Amino acid sequence: MIDHLTQPLVYFFGQGRADGTATMKDILGGKGAGLAEMTNIGIPVPPGFTIASTVCPTYLALNQFPPRLKPQAEAALERIEAATGKQFGGASNPLLVSVRSGAALSMPGMMETILNLGLNDTTVRGLEQLSGNSRFAWDSYRRFVQMYGCVVFDLPKRLFEERLEAAKHRTGVSRDIDLPIEEFRTLVADFKAAIAAETGKPFPEEPLDQLWGAIAAVFESWNTRRAIDYRKLHDIPDSMGTAVNVMAMVFGNMGDDSGTGVAFTRNPSTGEHHLYGEFLLNAQGEDVVSGARTPEPIANLKTEMPQIYGELDKVARTLERHFRDVQDLEFTIERGHLYMLQTRRGQRTGFAAVRVAVEMVDEGTITEEEAVARVPPNDLNQLLHQTIDPTGELDLIATGLPASPGAASGTVVFNADRAEELGRKGTAVILVRRETSPEDFHGMVAARAIVTARGGMTSHAAVVARGMGKPCVAGAQDLDVDEAAGQFRVGTRTIAEGEWISIDGANGRIYAGQAKLISPELSGHYDRLMTWADRMRHLRVRVNADTPADAHRGRDFGAEGIGLCRTEHMFFEGDRLGAMREMILAEDEAGRKKALAKLLPMQRGDFEGIFRAMEGFPVTIRLLDPPLHEFLPKEPEEIATLAHDMGKTVKDVQRIIDSLSEINPMLGLRGCRLGIMYPEITTMQARAIFEAACTVAERKGRVQPEVMIPLVAHVIEFRKQALIVRQVAEEVFRERQITVPYLLGTMIELPRAALTADEIAREAQFFSFGTNDLTQTTWGLSRDDAGVFLPAYLEKNIIEFDPFQELDITGVGRLISMAVDLGRKTRQDLKVGICGEHGGEPRAIAFCEAQKMNYVSCSPYRVPIARLAAAQAALAERGTMDRTRGTL
Amino acid sequence: MIDHLTQPLVYFFGQGRADGTATMKDILGGKGAGLAEMTNIGIPVPPGFTIASTVCPTYLALNQFPPRLKPQAEAALERIEAATGKQFGGASNPLLVSVRSGAALSMPGMMETILNLGLNDTTVRGLEQLSGNSRFAWDSYRRFVQMYGCVVFDLPKRLFEERLEAAKHRTGVSRDIDLPIEEFRTLVADFKAAIAAETGKPFPEEPLDQLWGAIAAVFESWNTRRAIDYRKLHDIPDSMGTAVNVMAMVFGNMGDDSGTGVAFTRNPSTGEHHLYGEFLLNAQGEDVVSGARTPEPIANLKTEMPQIYGELDKVARTLERHFRDVQDLEFTIERGHLYMLQTRRGQRTGFAAVRVAVEMVDEGTITEEEAVARVPPNDLNQLLHQTIDPTGELDLIATGLPASPGAASGTVVFNADRAEELGRKGTAVILVRRETSPEDFHGMVAARAIVTARGGMTSHAAVVARGMGKPCVAGAQDLDVDEAAGQFRVGTRTIAEGEWISIDGANGRIYAGQAKLISPELSGHYDRLMTWADRMRHLRVRVNADTPADAHRGRDFGAEGIGLCRTEHMFFEGDRLGAMREMILAEDEAGRKKALAKLLPMQRGDFEGIFRAMEGFPVTIRLLDPPLHEFLPKEPEEIATLAHDMGKTVKDVQRIIDSLSEINPMLGLRGCRLGIMYPEITTMQARAIFEAACTVAERKGRVQPEVMIPLVAHVIEFRKQALIVRQVAEEVFRERQITVPYLLGTMIELPRAALTADEIAREAQFFSFGTNDLTQTTWGLSRDDAGVFLPAYLEKNIIEFDPFQELDITGVGRLISMAVDLGRKTRQDLKVGICGEHGGEPRAIAFCEAQKMNYVSCSPYRVPIARLAAAQAALAERGTMDRTRGTL
């Protein structure tokens, strides 16, 4: 708690000593804390002071400054005067200051800045003399009045720009800086008159009035619409407030021995350890921002100002060592003197994050724990997938949802068969569909990437693509896909089959043409970081894999078992689909059994491959889950073909399809309900699992099947299905004369299962939370239909995130937490994990760690992310995440 | 706890004293406790003894009797001999006994009985002499051997019947009793030989062997398949066991001074206070059961045996006064002596239950609390609805689900328009549909009853019918309805439009022809009972009513407000549907607002009527809930008509319909999601509510609107919608210069709302649990689709009841309980109720009482049931339900 009565409201920094430190970010804001810390450790910083952020809410509530503020601020101003030898408002050697906002959390571009404050008709003459440059002095004055008018009096920019344009027109010049000096003088007078006319008050000549006006304006900028929206979006409390930094101006535009620039202490793209940035001689920051001149790379400073460069390099090393992280710096050179104006934590790419973290451990700067804690898990996506070269020319045509990361280029195709045909020839194709269904699977396999016009982050296309690690942009609503005509329209353009497009699944962008791609490379740095992470985490990380190929891929990425093997995906391929349809269309149990007998060897083969790929690790196999109609065709021609193949009439087939159609298939005949209605399906699947397991075990392979019964709502459902599985297991073990240890558990994906987890855990040996379906039922939200209104929900800030992308810890999490507690109450050694889309999401993983779950499971390409996130979660639980000191 | 070492295993009764009492049902079983109690209070009961039910599990586990049993039983047998002066196995005056099962809970017909035990080749001669009737003696012997063979040796009935038939054939007689006496002798020998051949052991001649064999057989009958199934169905623990009653035989077939009969102490149909029953002279119970002779009404006994009748009447009064309830009696008259063989609580109709309960209070036999506690709430259905006269001839053609109670006769129609057309002419019609949709509403209004071939207890037809109090049989799957041809087939029969059928919605039966109906009459007894109930209950009872007519009906039934007014039902009628469709088809907000402006006065009018009908009581109005596509037509012709009416192309209308179609509409764009996407709908509805409220309030009416926001998953949804409602309320109050107090709350119908009830209660003033939808999402079960597998679930005993009919207290209840606790944690005075189908279900009401809810709400015809159930729940919570002593 801050004692508001005795706590200083103003913190001076200058002459090598500051009232504040880097740890006081809450009070000083990020910028103020950085300035204070730099001052304390001997870095050259222009003197100044910071007004505590705690003043902000008081000011905004009362619309007046606390009485203690003015004397403290004016005392600090005197200290600036003493440090600089200049006087605020002084005629001969005037002190000018900048006034800048700076909250504890960065809100880039959200709040206001005023430069050159302290200029008036008197002090401008002092500046003229001091700088020996009248145009500079008057231009500074002109800019100040304009900035003040906009920021403090909230006047439109237009008001000043019109006058500036008129002056240029009048004098026939095109650049501001070429205006004759009298024009600047005229403009200052003009601007002041305009402000007076608009506000009804004269422009404040008195520098102290200017200062308090500016401070008030900075505080008020905390409550602009955009600042409020930004805070809401980023969960920043309104009560935090901003600090105000008042600092002596230094000028980079005082001649060729002056300049300004920005620098990173390491390369933020690659992580290489060298100074990285750019600068401009004889310029102010504004000139860099406006783009009027092109800055030079920082390396050139070495030749042009070797001493300054040396100083800067030393400052960079000092700061990085001090803050123990890459710093992003702003500096100004005034007449051969280097001044640091800002230091903060440097943003970086995933590549750089990994490299810097590992190298800093080698340099002895940070610990391995800190290295692991420091890399944002999702940044690993960049290391695992291709990316689009941002330096190439790009022709953006649409943006959809970033459904599966990675970039790809290819020619457009509109159906799965064509994708397969061309893919087989080695053509790079991108499959573009209105939406995909299981029947498109072979086309998705053949395509480099998938684009859909409909569907969300958990649509069929998105889920399958993520599973395969293929780039996918889903729900690109601007695309008007005409599959029959073999083209899509977007805006006024039409793109036909065979034309090139490129997509970036990490941000949902779709480009016309063939973009240049950058391939990822897993560096030694990555391997070392992941080794450390694996040592630190408690949670096991498994992969969701339905095929031996997926299983291998997952294992390559470090998965320690399979957390979800969806048996139904196996049924969509080739001749399996035929046998599956035969089973569904069978009129009686005998017919179903006959068809199931055909499926048995195929399933057994799949399981054998999967068990082999995952030898030594557990493999969780979920029994058949989806509604049967998903396996049946929808189009009349396909129905006719199927009827012909099955020796049935079209009418009969249509009747069966109709009888299987459901109003709410999500809540219908699926999951264990299928196994209860048709126990022969469960029998066949159990047999395939245990026969495969025995085969591998016979050859001395270590197999650990975990059979998972899906969509259980009531413990008796589980009991009935478990009985069948156990009976089959015993039969097979007897036949094969070998026993394989296995577990029998359930997917907790319905609220009722969570609510009665104590009962279910009496029978089930493990729980795997199916958070996709659990989210659907807990929210009463169909992910297939939510696309119509969820975007509006996000836009209107009704929800902060899509609960299908990020785990809803408040709601769904409460249910999960309850289920874990209830389950462990009746079975202490209950194995608990999470599978589904949230299993690779860092926030969800932290939640799983807090619940002391045993494992998380996710799609292959998210396995490394999950490993890192799990380590961070373990560190956070131990309280070692935040050991990094004073990160800005 | 029973001390198994010292507790007697055998309880004698006879000569006016019994070891047991009525309170020992757990040990003696219902029958044994009744016999003991009757003996104790001086009722003439043949002497006998009861073997404690605790022996049963021991015997079944060890397959032998406990050592203490035999001496105790044989001592008791001697006491019977002493009491009767007969000897067990005696040659001259033999004692015969019956051996009967009798568990603590009645399991009618589930277990075994053996009569005439003690007969052998010696004792049969004694019986001959004693009775002076050789045929009687030998027939008794023949029956005993046959019964013993079947029950104790588990031989097929056929074995004996074949021999009996052969004997009749041989002698040319058609009735058993007409066989010559020698044939009986031959048959006894034949039967014994057959038994010996089948079992490999001679038939036991020794009466004691017979007795122990019979006792063992009774115990073993506890574990027959049907007994086990029966117990499972009725939740009776297997460990309970049955007692065995061994009692001296008395014979009603010893001549015209003998007889047998059954009697109720009051009329079980009407409750009238007179002896009710029937008897046969010179007969045994078996003769009554076999239907060989037709019994006489008990009143005739008054003339035929006035003294016996007087005794019986006195016994009846004594027993009723003693047990404080209607008794169901069995008696035998042996040579002018009356013996009571059984007394137990008399089953009765709803009419009788009410009348008896109230009259017993008047007689001073029971308290008002007991009267209220004693009437099963669902029995009131009989008092509220028509019933089919069971005495008429009935032609049952199919049975469906008992979807809405009451009976009706009418001619069949197959579409709503025809129903309306004929109904308007006063023709009694029954609407038969494959299933109904909101567009059939006008036809349902016009029909006497509704029958559907598909859909469950909460299908559209069922819900609407219950709301209207119309009989409905839903899901009669045997009906093959051909709406186009205007007929339905059932089995081999075809019933066409215009033919009569009759239905009973209380049991789901459908009859061909016009059955005779009995109209209900609410008696003074009913009114008095309900007045007492109302005084005892805590829960308020409200009605679900969507129209002023429903509101009036609910109020007539005693509703204290409306708990659920579904505004969408108003939109399906007449010109509203047109305006609603115009709103849905509007392409922009302006178009929607135009259409909503047309709806506003209609809604306002409805609300005014409802507020008037419910003056002085709260009215909960739910804002628009269903998906919009429910309001749009499905058939091509209707779409064409709509397009024409709206001045749009068919293609445009079809496109809008398509865009509104959802994969899982239950989890789609509905509830408050509509209000969030189209805030103008909420605005219109709020305006209609408050304008109507102000109009009523201006005329001094007391209005208490409670605005309910449906399908809230996240507190922010509620907040946004609540803001609109509050703004409109303030606007209207300002315009009308009057303020109406109102509440703003939500329907808790999604698990997430329950899980975050603490957050939601910060903003919502009341919760109403929408248990239909909450059950759907908690179970992940669509009530529209569950019909395919729920019946199998019930049949396979996976679930004990349909969770849409009875509240799932284990699962859904846990969620509700959690929500109530969380909600009241943040808002102590949170008003909590339940609406939807479970609101009128007695078990659910008891649950609501335990949760200390404020009210329940249900359809109009269930209001009385809910009032009574609420009173019983309150009594149960106070522990006053079971004060009734020794109910058998």
Image (tube, coloured by chain):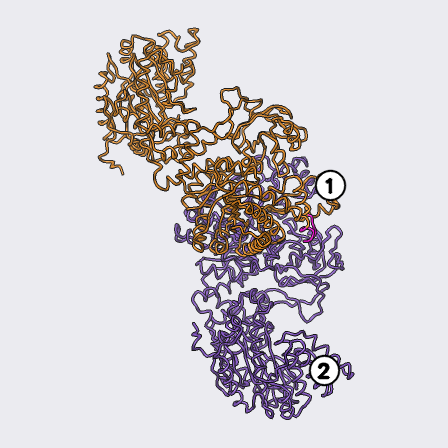
Chain colours: A purple, B orange
Q: x and y percent of residue A661 in the render?
A: 61, 41
Q: Nearer the viewer, residue B598 or A276?
A: B598
Can residue B357 be seen by looking at this rendering?
yes
Q: Is residue B811 above or below residue B14?
A: below
The answer to if A115 sits in the magenta stretch is no
On the rendered image, what quadrant is the N terminus of chain A found in? Answer: bottom left
Instruction: Read off the chain for label 1.
Output: B
Against B613, residue B219 (above or below) is above
- Kind of residue at disc 1: Ala
Q: Position of residue B790 (x, y in %)?
A: 52, 38
- Packing grade of label 1 (10 A; few <14, some 14-19, many >=20) is some
Q: Residues within 10 Å of mark 2 (few under 14, many from 20)?
A: few
Q: Nearer the viewer, residue B199 or A866?
A: A866
Chain that bears disc 2 = A
- The answer to whether residue A726 shows anywhere in this view is no
- Is B590 a magenta residue? yes
Numbered disc total: 2
Left or right, B71 with respect to B512, comes to left
Q: Which mark is residue A176?
A: 2
Per the rendered image, the range of residues in magenta is: B585-593
Horizontal and vertical percent position of residue A565: 54, 52
Numbered tag placed on residue B640 in the rendering: 1
Q: Amino acid at mark 2?
A: Asp
Instruction: Determine whether, in the image, residue B516 is placed left or right of residue B110.
Output: right
Q: Are marks 2 and 1 on the same chain?
A: no
Numbered badge on residue A244: none
Q: Main secondary structure of the magenta part?
A: helix
Viewer-nearest residue: A719 or A877: A877
Rendering quarter of residue B62 = top left
User: Residue at the location (77% across, 81% down)?
Assistant: A169
